[in-house]
Every structure is written in structure tokens, then in C-alpha cells.
Amino acid sequence: MQDTDVVIIGAGAAGLMCAAKAGARGRRVLVLDHANKAGKKILMSGGGHCNFTNLYTEPANFLSQNPHFCKSALARYTQWDFIALVNKHAVPHHEKKLGQLFCDGKSMDILQMLLAECEAVGARVRLDTTVEKIERIETAQDGGEGAGGAQGGQGGYLLQTTSGPVRCTSLVIATGGLSIPTMGATGFGYEVARQFGHQVLPTRAGLVPFTITDQLKELCTELSGTSVDGLVSCNGKSFRENILFTHRGLSGPAILQISSYWLPGQAVEINLLPDRCVPDWLAEQRRDRPNAELKTLLGEVFTKKMAQLLCEQWFVSKPIKQYAHAELENIATRLSEWQVVPAGTEGYRTAEVTLGGVDTREVSSKTMESLKAPGLYFIGEVLDVSGHLGGFNFQWAWASGNAAAQFV
């Protein structure tokens, strides 16, 4: 039987941050993970360069059924705190765009930094270890915020693992969501939450490409690889970034962002010319270049191939002076208020985040401790907190991991 103060299940971003910070408080920490490597999603993130935080992080960048929950942790461990850690380890980095910070080198720089922080405080990481069973060790003294290892007096938890039994005072669930199962993602954290009486809100894929199966599929396939700047809107939210046509449908940053707000059956509105008042632009072209063909004009704002396909599939191309006013209105509406009803998304296979998860109304926003099972903590993506694209989900991992680490 191994005895320790804190067991963290999950050697990802949140788990490693929590381990390093708890170890720095003198806690004996053991991190368990069923994978053969720590931080697999860190390594693949940001195209291998790890978009590790965002300069403009604020609570508005997160989705949750309990939107105030994330505020406390984010305020206590900010993007500037993580940047200071990155600078301490001399990890070269740069701002790519929109406040997104990336490593100049590889994502491995961030993972090695976290592992070095863990090693420095004696927090151990044990891989290739599956947790088979968790039991609560009951005591007469029960309940109370922050009732984990820092307070003492609690019975703690007994874990049966493939590398032997482990007993701990505080148990931290940092197992992430269901996104990218090839990286080892499972619903383990949700099962633990349910075991100890927690509500798990419905989960679905977020930050994920759309699939298209109707008549638009041909257009998407023909334009596969083409990227356009667009404004995408759904359910009162809008994002302005690139849209990428793929052979399965639509992707790119703007689509990934709006996917977290879209529900099956709903239309997504796309403005393909967000810098222009399209009716005015068409009127100007008609006045100044009456003999120019529509496909020529569109070829000046899109690729020639895209202009040709739009004219073949949406409009009849002719000299712009030949269009009636109503026809020009229709062209303008199609270009600036294109209504797309996706067939679905590519699902967890390619999703960057899992929406939904452990209901935060049953977790302390100060300590990340369960309000139902003393000494049990939830951090990171397993909770119903999901960030926008651009480094926000990593910042939630760092902030929630740090919050729990102060109380385990």
C-alpha cells in the first residue's frame, strides 16, 4: 500500500500544473496516467507549437452553464503568471495573432517545463497506470470547504491501480474530456463524478469542423483548401476569422469558434465580405464598371476559382449593368448573409474541446473541491468550462490546476 497526500489522475496540462503547485506547498504528490507519455495533447496542440495562453484572457472567453464559476480561478492565476513561468524557463515564444502565444520551438518545451517544475518539488508522475477502482475512506468528521489534505482529519481515498493500491487524503480528477480519443481521451472523469453523486451535464464536441451533406457539399469539395476571411454568426455570437472549405464541409478558426455555440438543425450565417457593405459595393461597380462581368468582380475579392464556382452554383454571370435591382439585392444577400445548415460536426475525433461536463454548481469555485465528497477535486476540461480557440483552454487548465493546488 502506497500512502501519499495527493493523487492527481491525469498527466495533462491541468494535472501537471496542479502537481507542481501542490508539491511547492510541501504536499506529497503522485500523478497517475494510463497513457505511455505525459501531456500528449500538449504535444499536439497548436500544430506542434502549443498555443499555451492568450494575452486577452477574460471570463467572457469561456462557455459554461454557470458562467461566473471560472472568474475566481482565472483572477488568481492569470496569463501573466503563466508567461512569467515560461520566461523563468527561458522558453522562446511569440504572439501569432489575436493575443495567441505560441512556442518558437516545439510544444515539448512547455511539457518539459511542467515536468521540470514537478521534479523540482518532488511530485512524481507514474505512467502506464490505470485506476480500476476508487473508494472513499469515511471518517466521523465529514464536510467543509477545503477539507482536503491541507486541513487534515479526512479519511481520503483508496485507489486500486494496475501498479498497486494507493491511499491519499486528496484526490484530483484532471482527466480531461472526450476530445481526440486517439490521444487516450475517455469519459473516466465523468464516471468518477457520477460515482460520488455529481451531476454531469450533457457533453458534445466543441471547436470542431462542420460537415455538409446537402447541395453545398459539391461547392465545399470543389473549393477544398480555399480559405476566405469571413464573419460567422449563430445564436447571438459572431466570430471574424478565416473560413476553410474542406472536402467534408467547413473548417478554419471562425467555424471552429462558432461550432461551440451551434446546435444541430440550426443555420449558421456567413458574411463572405465582412469589410464591405455589399449592396453599396455592387451599386458602385454598376455605376463605375457597368460592362464588367460579375465573375470578374468577384474574382477581385475571392480566388478566381471561387468566383467562377459561386457564379456557376449561385448566380448567372453577366455584365453587371444587366442585373435588375432585385437581382443585385439577392446577390448581396447571398454574399453577406449566406445561410448554411450543417449536417453535423466531425465529432470528438477532431474536436479541440469537450463542451459540458461536471456541473460546476456542485464544485467550489475557490478550491475546485467537490461540494458532495470532501477531498475530491475536479480541474481542467472535465468541468463544464470550455474556452474559445486561441490558448484559452490552456489558461483554464493552468488556473484551475493552481486553484486546487492551494487547498489539496
Image: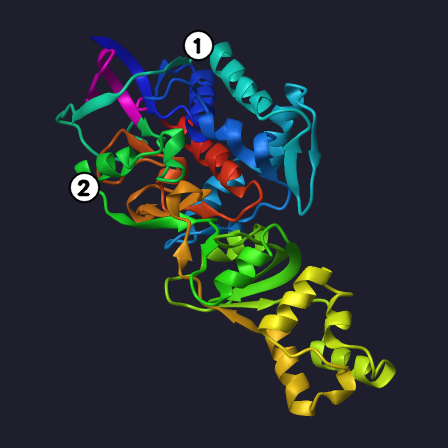
The image quadrant of residue 338 is bottom right
Q: Position of residue 139 (x, y in %)?
A: 14, 24
What's the residue at 49%, 41% (across, down)? 393
Whole-number angstrom distance, CA of label 2 to CA of label 1: 33 Å
Residue 281, numbered circle: none
Q: Position of residue 69 (x, y in %)?
A: 41, 48
Neighbourhood count class around disc 2 (C-alpha, 10 Å): few under 14, some 14–19, many 20 upward:
some
Q: Is residue 121 above or below residue 175?
A: above
Give the left or right position of residue 339, taking residue 332 as reference. Answer: left
Residue 149 visible in the displayed image? yes
Q: Per the image, is 169 magenta?
A: yes
What's the residue at 61%, 83% (across, down)? 330
Instruction: Specify the quadrant that holds the N terminus.
Output: top left
Residue 197, numbered circle: 2
What's the residue at 63%, 66% (across, down)? 309
Residue 152 visible in the displayed image? no
Choose the circle earlier in sequence order: 2 or 1: 1
Q: Is residue 70 above or below residue 145?
A: below
Give the left or right position of residue 289, taking residue 16 as reference. Answer: right
Instruction: Specify the quadrant that holds the C terminus.
Output: top left
Three-letter code, disc 1: Gly
The image quadrant of residue 10 is top left
Give the left or right position of residue 365, taking residue 103 as reference. Answer: left
Q: Is residue 268 above or below residue 139?
A: below
Q: Nearer the viewer, residue 34 or 295?
A: 295
Q: Per the image, is 244 magenta?
A: no
Q: Which residues are magenta?
A: 149-171
Instruction: Provide the residue designation for mark 1.
Output: 122
Q: Nearer the viewer, residue 235 or 352?
A: 352
